Image (cartoon, grey):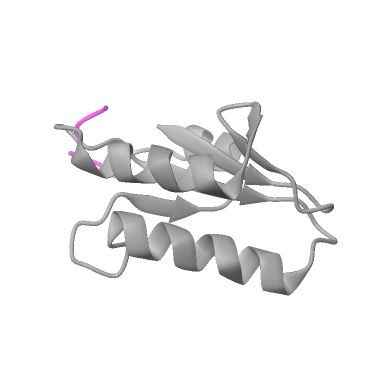
Amino acid sequence: MNVVALTHDGSIYWNGTEISRAKLDRYLTLSHGLNPEPNVLLETEMGGACSMLEAVRDQMDKALECRQPYARCSEGIQSVWRDLPSPAGAPIS
């Protein structure tokens, strides 16, 4: 899983390293071309500008085709996703 973090001041981080919007676009495009394609999780900090959040979401949607079936896009808090129990009978990944 790759984590895109958006801070309240509009800074963008890819797996903990601050990056530009242009580099985010390159990373998202590369990620989408991998086989298997990794999940990309968007984490946001409270208090950020909604316009910046929407811009990053749109950037992810475009590069990762997030609105398509079986897309590998997520949004939330990584620790919550990681700690959710798997449904009965589901494989553990």
Residue 77 visible in image: no
Q: Which residues lie in the magenta part?
A: 88-93
Q: Percent x, y for residue 63? A: 34, 56
> What residue appears at the point 19 percent right and 57 percent down from the top-left corner?
70
Q: Is residue 79 left or right of residue 1?
A: right
Q: Which residue is located at x 16 percent, y 32 percent?
A: 36
Residue 40 percent coordinates (x, y): 41, 43
Q: Relative to the observer, which residue lies in front, 7 or 75? A: 7
Q: Residue furthest left?
A: 35
Q: Indicate the quadrant containing the N terminus: top left, top right, bottom left or bottom right.
A: top left
Q: Is residue 11 above or below residue 64?
A: above
Q: Nearer the viewer, residue 69 or 31?
A: 31
Find the residue positioned furthest to the front: 22
**What residue is at 74 percent from the left and 45 percent from the top?**
11
In the image, what residue occupies the spot 31% across and 55% down?
A: 64
Front position in the image: 71 or 62: 62
- The secondary structure that dominates the magenta segment is loop
Q: Is residue 32 above or below residue 10?
A: above
Q: Is residue 43 visible?
A: yes
Measuring from the top left, give residue 74's x and y in whole percent: 43, 52
* 55 relative to 71 in the view: left or right: right
Q: Is residue 63 left or right of residue 35?
A: right
